[in-house]
Amino acid sequence: MIPTAAKDKPLNDSPTNADPTAPQRRAQRSTSSLLAYGEPMLWLTGGALTICLVMIIGLLVLIFYQGVSTFWPAPLVQITTIEDRTFMGEVTREEIFAPAETVFTQLAPEVAEQARRTVAANDGTAHRWLVRIGNFELTGDHFNWFSDFMIRDERRPEWAVTVERLSWGRFYGIPAAFLVDGAVVVDTSAQAWQRYKAHHGEIRKRWRQRRHLETHAIGKLNRQEEAARLDMRTALLEHGPDSARYAAARERLETVQRKSEIETAQLREQINALNTENSRYQLRLVTADGQEKNLALEEIVRAFPANRLSVTEKTAIYLSRWWEFFTDDPREANSEGGVFPAIFGTVVMTLVMSLAVVPFGVLAALYLREYAKAGPLISAVRIAINNLAGVPSIVFGVFGLGFFCYFVGGTIDQLFFSAKLPSPTYGTGGILWASLTLALLTLPVVIVATEEALAAVPGSMREGSYACGASKWQTIKRIVLPRAMPGIMTGMILAMARGAGEVAPLMLVGAVKLAPELPVDGIFPFLHPERSFMHLGFHIFDLGFQSQNSEAAKPMVFTTTLLLIVIIASLNLGAVLLRNRLRKKFASGVF
Amino acid sequence: MHSKQILRMVMACLAVVLMATLPAMAQMVDPNLKPYTPVAGVSGSLKSVGSDSMNNEMTLWAEGFLSFYPNVQIEIEGKGSSTAPVAMIAGTAQFGPMSRAMKAKEIDDFEKRYGYKPTALRTSIDMLAVYVNKDNPIKSLSLQQLDAIFSKGRRGGAGKDIRTWGDLGLTGEWANAPISIYGRNAASGTYGFFKENALFGGDFKDEVKEQPGSSSVVQGVARDKFGIGYSGIGYRTADVRVVALSPTATGTPVEASPENAYTGEYPLARFLYVYVNHRPGSQLDPLRREFVRYIFSRQGQEDVVKDGYYPVPALIAEEDLTTVGVQ
């Protein structure tokens, strides 16, 4: 309390001491020097803040708008060109352009004449739409541009249906018939759609049942076999090929293999029964250009008659798409489906990183601030830490790869996992090594923030503690650390924000394009720190720059970015709440 | 060069059978390929390090494979073909997808470490396409023109350097517009293949904007009206146009269409390889064996079509399966 009061005093004094004639004098001076009056600086600082805010808010609004609108079901348009070809799909983008003469020379003469007239009537410019036409297995294209002078007819067919599938991307068509066991049961759009709705739910349920059997039941057998094989390898490596142990292990492996073969066969039978039941049902769709295609209901993730939906139905589809996005594994080389493994990987990695960086950073800062004697060595250490904060993150990635993955991981493999070699266990990128690399990267943030927090603890409090007979460590533990805790938490928040958004080093130490197996799961030993993982930041990079169907992946980039921002914000919010609780605890615990 | 000759020989006869009429994409897969049948006792983890052009292809194979064996762990890294031999020699990857054949030096390094050569599997066929913006009126280019656009030395024999679209005969606003060149980074197999076949081994110009991924090249050209770039045919989008190429300055231009890939007429057709570490005469472990079988199964080759590349015929599939001891 005392130092604050002392600080306040001169501040309070200045206005009361002011000369009553001062405003007048200042006004006089302002005519000679605008700068001295302070007005330009006000505008400069205010302007800088405004520009910052506009940029930040603009970015957030763009991401939010694009990210939120991606999953809203779009209507389907059917376009007939003047060359008499018909397409159907969703309009995704539009633009105005000035068609060059060569555009017309490629057309048939009479058609070209008509097109020229349309463009000429429009001051030489034309409008064009990018339409997602889907049906990749029939057309070989996902998207197509249509210019207005090429369009003869445009309509929205009532029964046009958007189909999201497990593979081959989207399909657009009009339901023509519903087939059971290959025979047409009903043959009008409305009836076929009714049948589809009646059967789709149970078929998807059977499909999920099948997936469960495959992942859990068969997976368990496979793991048992793998464990037995590893035991055999270990026995071979440790005791040689002629030992009794090796023979016993080999026999065990054979028993396990025989047993699992029988059980797998039984499970396969169950799976086949489910498959046979599911494959009985098919929906026949007719594309805009008249081709027929039978889709197995099992292959359909979601289908809806886009032009017949009410707002409530659209909202339901919108929400179900979000739900899929949050909870499902990615499909189709990550361009469809969900991002659950990436969400999980990001959160686990950030938490492990915080667990690693905070204790180390705090201990280091404690030594620097409390124990070390000021001198050239300590100054050098401080400068080194500050410089560390400026090292490009990819350099940390290279270091992590060389030190953690190859050196530490390689040694661990030699010592404990020699049976699995040459396939590395820890000797390659993994979530543990990624977390530790990022911990190194964010260490300076934590050290600097902690040092500041420790420095802000008033000397009088320490002195009081010493006066009561407390030792140095007792003082730090009981007096300094609790008081500095909110500041330390701030450091952690900053470290988490930096770490969660970092991508470059992760590409080297464990983030991969596809890793549906999670680093934490229900399989012994539950934690798998050696596994590679998916990361939202890397997922964004992958969608934006590596995706084959880049046009379809573009909206997903925004959605994933939005998700990443929300996750980082909520992790930070959690830390802020924790800090506030600590503050309160501290406030009530003192005096 | 060698691979191209094989392409020509095998494909020419098959093309007649397969491409009598232009079939829908899904029917491009050779009907003689066997559908994949799962076996018992496959588990463990796989890692693939290599080509960026094949990144999505590997992912699709992995997804398909996982639908049969959900407990297998597959990790895929794609930063360029040149990373594949390094990872395979270090033993960090079981599969090395590459969009070009391994160089002699890389094979030597591998042989030094293991005592035998790595095995190349020809998994699919790609056409290295030359992309321009969708509004670009250019009809076709010869390899010599490409060389003059992309390279410093013009080893292909072009008379003079090409710097503007006007040099290629375009008029109007294009006449004075400089060509904006997009390419891949040096770790990429696509870079190596293009350098070897379109630049006749010469060096790229310094102005080439080197992109980290195949998709980035296409997106760059899509945004840049005066851009030109090269990438696998699988990355084509509606925003870019594929230019027909003629092998000689006076030759007829060849469209980048499936038929021309199979007949080998398209000058920049190539195999996409997956390399495996296989001691000749030995058996692959069950996991790798099954993955290779999956790649050459009907499902695996359908995945190839999904990614925009072209499947290999059953003949090649059988031949390559035999080299790794799979019947």
Image: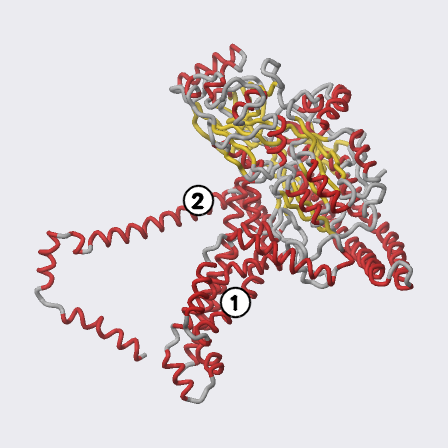
Q: Position of residue A323 (x, y in %)?
A: 59, 50
At a point 47% along the width and 67% down the height, the residue shown is A489
Can residue A227 be seen here? The reply is: yes
Can residue B303 be seen here? The reply is: no
Q: How many marks?
A: 2
Alpha carbons under labels 1 and 2: distance apart: 34 Å
How busy is the neighbourhood of tag 2: few (under 14 within 10 Å), some, or many (20 plus)? some
Closest to the observer, A562 or B199: B199
Closest to the observer, B322 or A372: A372
Closest to the observer, A140 or A396: A396
Question: On the picture, is B135 further left or further right than A248?
Answer: left
Label 1 vs 2, first from the N-terminus? 2
How busy is the neighbourhood of tag 1: few (under 14 within 10 Å), some, or many (20 plus)? many
Closest to the observer, A495 or A169: A495
Residue carrying label 1 = A358
Amino acid at the residue labelled 1: Val
Q: Position of residue B251 (x, y in %)?
A: 61, 14
Nearer to us: label 1 or label 2:
1
For the C terminus of chain A, the image quarter is bottom left
At a point 14% along the width and 71% down the height, the residue shown is A17
Compared to B242, does A437 lie above or below?
Answer: below
Q: Chain of mark 2?
A: A
Residue carrying label 2 = A62
Query: Quarter-wise, where is residue A526 in the image?
Result: bottom right
